Image (cartoon, rainbow, N blue to C red):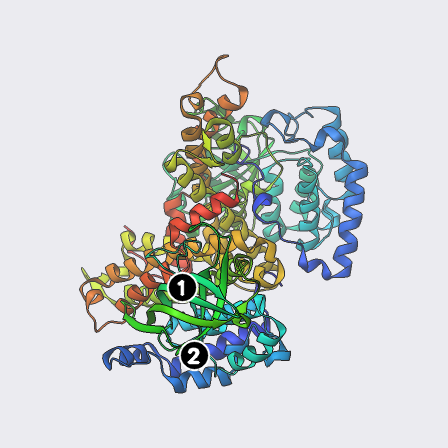
């Protein structure tokens, strides 16, 4: 299962990491921060500095539309500045900036609650993979279209028979000389019914070890033979779909990387996906309830303390965990920019998504029966949303590699424990 | 650079690791235990540690210190945790030194700090009176008599209290029995008339004592800071102690964890290394994830001592609570994953388990720090 815009978490990290930006002793970065601050102040419309709801997000694409004129203005100004993706090279529509400069922009945006102008896995996942593995023509064709909001992407990884064991995927791409012929289906294709393109893992060789017969294909969703069905979820939403491929002709130039070598591209992309899921809590503030506020609203206090000992203890545990996670994101970034190797990035998807689930459970416990409303006027919008997000949070530890798969990866890559024989 | 060790700090860590592996391996603690060593640490080792400058890491140069910062002290404490090295480093060079540094008069600093820095003067904080850390619950009395105070009361769990040259005694001259108001810190000669000390033999084979103060006469110029206003000094001193002991706990947990992971790769059952079994892999991976979190928390808390002291209370409680739970969990899993040999005295793992339990009680257990964190957060 793969889902991003369903993320349930607000920007909580800033409440924990209030460190002065000591690295900014670098004069250049200090000046840059001043410039960014000034520019944002002059260019980010007031309405785009408010916590965002799902309906207010702009995802681009041929079928996409701006939720408001201000959202359009904000997006266009950021695009002209190259700040939709500050770290991408300028020739592909990026800002050509370093990670550290990119972080300054994100920090400053967060400081004024500036909304993310464009959402999408094109930015978060496909783009970085294309920059690493794509050829020049593919970069030219797709990167700028992503930044311009012209193409929205879906991810075709899981299949009904290939979930955690992703490499066992069966969706077939046959070499027909001048094109591939694709047959099979992909599941948990997030918002595929609204997307223009899908990047897919397909089987191009059945004679070799399963990981060695996989290729990475870019497929136009408008191609004949493609159909998509939404899947109803326990949250009442249907943002996940199943996408079917029936004799779909895909041009040869849409192969990313080498034939049968798609597993490396897939894994590199998964690193971005997991980083994204781990950092769900640190982007634009969302209009959702956070446990500390809920505690003050729904719980009894005496002498400044929550009376219910169990809930107070659970709330401290949660806050300490989030504090530690926020500090670890910060450490991980510092290590990366200083060239220090650490195991931190590999544990963050597991920790971040588990914490999201914990938070949702905690919110329900704090709200009591008032947190259990499904619909109707007896409950506030926030209360109804909290329950829906609780249901959605269950997908977080399954999508993008389940928690169990994450632990397998830590055991193998960090601890270098011997691997069990695969059946 | 925040949350990443500088090159100098890494160098200090590597030096400390090499030195301790040679001069204070786990076997050294085992020997002190088996020989019922009356001092509880090796004076020669302490001299060498002082020569390396460890006793003076956090002290300013004007008092003979290295002025290397608290993060440097954390690095050394962590390495000491790896080999369970017994020494007065924590009691004297962290807690005692901090009390004098934060609260002492210029005269007291000039008198005491150079001795501490050289490892020649050993201090110990006589604080606890009950079997849980309750820094305000002080019943020991200080009654003024002219230019002197008379101290009466009992102290327990005084780390290195049996061997310290000078005790820093927390006593009450005013205020309600559980109030932070009315506390004072007194410098008391360890051998002063009326002081009786009994070493307590504890699970970790390290050094603590119970004290009895019976009409101990202390001159009023031996008060650290102002009479009745010790809390403003004691609270930050305890936070420094909490963060430093958390660093030791990190070393203790890491060493136990690494030894366990090595064992998982080597021990074979059912025809395969037991580390290939998912039941054990997932538990080990979860510990790794916890270690990553604790690493960030610890670095941030250590840095806060020098760089953002206003954030120290909440970070110290976060660090102590999280490291308490880490070292408890890891030491338990270390024993369990070693199987039968894990419960033998022959294997060192048991020594880590026991040291873990004692450090968990030093300056606040998990409940104490969760409560403090919640209170500081306003709930």
Query: From this viewpoint, which residue is outermost toward the front?
Result: B146
Q: Residue at x 71, y 47 (%)?
A: A105
Numbered tag placed on residue B249 in the rendering: 1
Q: Position of residue B128 (x, y in %)?
A: 38, 60
Label 1 crowd (10 A; few <14 / some 14-19 / many >=20)? many
Q: Position of B141 compared to A327: left or right?
A: left
Name the quadrant containing residue B304. bottom right
Above or below — where is B25 with respect to A305? below
Are dots 1 and 2 in contact, CB under 8 Å? Answer: no
Q: Position of residue B309 (x, y in %)?
A: 60, 58
Query: What's the chain of the residue with tag 1?
Result: B
Q: Position of B68 compared to B46: left or right?
A: right
Q: Of marks 1 and 2, which one's residue comes earlier in the chain?
A: 2
The reply to whether residue B297 is in sight is yes
Numbered tag placed on residue A219 in the rendering: none
Q: CA distance from mark 1 to mark 2?
A: 26 Å
Above or below — where is B111 with respect to A121? below
Q: Nearer the viewer, residue A97 or B355?
A: B355
The reply to whether residue A184 is in sight is no
Query: From this viewpoint, which residue is outermost toward the bottom?
Result: B44
Q: Nearer the viewer, residue A94 or A326?
A: A326
Query: From this viewpoint, which residue is outermost toward the top?
Result: A377
Q: Quarter holding the N terminus of chain A? A: top left
Query: What's the chain of the residue with tag 2?
Result: B
Numbered tag placed on residue B165 in the rendering: 2
Using the rendered image, report if marks 1 and 2 lie on a common chain. yes
């Amino acid at each position: 299962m793969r889902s991003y815009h369903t993320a349930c978490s607000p920007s909580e990290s800033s409440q924990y990491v209030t460190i002065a930006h000591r690295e900014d002793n670098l004069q250049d970065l200090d000046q840059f921060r001043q410039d960014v601050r000034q520019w944002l102040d002059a260019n980010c419309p007031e309405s785009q500095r408010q916590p965002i709801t799902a309906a207010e997000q702009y995802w681009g694409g041929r079928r996409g539309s701006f939720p408001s004129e201000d959202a359009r203005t904000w997006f266009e100004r950021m695009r002209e500045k190259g700040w939709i993706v500050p770290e991408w090279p300028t020739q592909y529509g990026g800002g050509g900036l370093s990670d550290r400069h990119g972080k300054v922009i994100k920090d400053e945006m967060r400081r004024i609650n500036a909304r993310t102008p464009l959402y999408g896995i094109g930015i978060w996942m496909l783009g970085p993979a294309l920059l690493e593995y794509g050829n020049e023509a593919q970069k030219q064709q797709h990167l700028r279209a992503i930044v311009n909001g012209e193409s929205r992407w879906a991810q075709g990884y899981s299949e009904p028979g290939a979930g955690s064991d992703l490499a066992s995927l069966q969706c077939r791409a046959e070499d027909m000389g001048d094109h591939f012929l694709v047959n099979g289906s992909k599941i948990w294709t997030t918002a595929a019914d609204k997307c223009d393109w899908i990047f897919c893992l397909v089987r191009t060789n059945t004679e070799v070890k399963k990981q060695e017969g996989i290729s990475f294909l870019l497929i136009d969703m408008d191609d004949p033979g493609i159909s998509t069905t939404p899947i109803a979820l326990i949250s009442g939403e249907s943002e996940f779909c199943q996408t079917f491929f029936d004799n779909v002709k895909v041009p040869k130039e849409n192969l990313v990387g080498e034939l049968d070598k798609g597993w490396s591209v897939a894994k590199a992309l998964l690193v971005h996906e997991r980083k994204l899921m781990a950092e769900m809590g640190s982007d634009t503030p969302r209009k959702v309830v956070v446990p500390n506020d809920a505690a003050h609203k729904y719980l009894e206090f005496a002498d400044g303390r929550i009376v219910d000992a169990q809930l107070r203890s659970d709330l401290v545990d949660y806050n300490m965990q989030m504090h530690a996670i926020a500090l670890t994101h910060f450490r991980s970034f510092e290590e990366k920019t200083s060239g220090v190797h650490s195991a931190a990035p590999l544990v963050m998807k597991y920790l971040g998504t588990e914490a999201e689930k914990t938070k949702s459970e905690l919110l329900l416990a704090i709200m009591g029966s008032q947190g259990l409303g499904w619909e109707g006027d007896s409950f506030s919008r926030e209360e109804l949303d909290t329950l829906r997000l609780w249901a959605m949070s269950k997908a977080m530890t399954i999508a993008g590699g389940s928690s169990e798969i994450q632990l397998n990866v830590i055991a193998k890559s960090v601890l270098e424990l011997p691997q069990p024989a695969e059946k | 650079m925040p949350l990443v060790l500088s090159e100098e700090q890494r160098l200090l860590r590597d030096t400390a690791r090499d030195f301790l592996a040679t001069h204070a391996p786990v076997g050294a603690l085992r020997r002190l235990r088996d020989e019922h060593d009356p001092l509880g640490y090796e004076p020669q080792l302490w001299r060498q540690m002082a020569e390396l400058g460890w006793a003076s890491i956090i002290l300013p140069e004007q008092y003979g210190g290295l002025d290397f910062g608290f993060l440097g002290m954390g690095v050394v404490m962590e390495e000491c945790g790896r080999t369970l090295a017994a020494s007065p480093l924590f009691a004297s060079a962290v807690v005692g030194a901090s009390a004098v540094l934060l609260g002492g008069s210029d005269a007291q600093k000039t008198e005491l700090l150079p001795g501490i820095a050289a490892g020649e003067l050993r201090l110990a904080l006589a604080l606890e009176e009950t079997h849980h850390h309750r820094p305000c619950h002080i019943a020991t009395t200080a009654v003024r008599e002219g230019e002197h105070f008379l101290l009466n009361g009992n102290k327990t769990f005084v780390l290195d209290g049996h061997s310290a040259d000078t005790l820093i005694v927390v006593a009450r001259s005013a205020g309600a029995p559980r109030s932070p108001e009315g506390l004072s810190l007194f410098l008391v000669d360890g051998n002063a008339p009326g002081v009786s000390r009994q070493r307590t033999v504890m699970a970790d084979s390290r050094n603590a004592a119970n004290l009895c103060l019976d009409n101990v006469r202390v001159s009023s110029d031996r008060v650290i800071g102002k009479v009745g206003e010790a809390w403003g000094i004691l609270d930050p001193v305890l936070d420094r102690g909490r963060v430093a002991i958390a660093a030791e706990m990190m070393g203790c947990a890491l060493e136990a964890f690494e030894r366990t992971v090595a064992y998982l790769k080597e021990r074979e059952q059912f025809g395969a290394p037991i580390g290939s079994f998912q039941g054990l892999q997932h538990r080990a991976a979860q510990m790794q994830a916890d270690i990553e979190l604790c690493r960030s928390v610890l670095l941030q808390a250590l840095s806060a001592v020098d760089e953002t002291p206003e954030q120290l209370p909440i970070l110290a409680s976060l660090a102590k609570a999280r490291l308490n739970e880490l070292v408890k969990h890891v030491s338990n899993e270390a024993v369990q994953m070693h199987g039968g040999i894990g419960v033998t005295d022959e294997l060192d793992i048991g020594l880590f388990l026991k040291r873990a339990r004692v450090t968990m009680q030093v300056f606040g257990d998990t409940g104490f720090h969760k409560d403090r964190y919640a209170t500081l957060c306003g709930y």
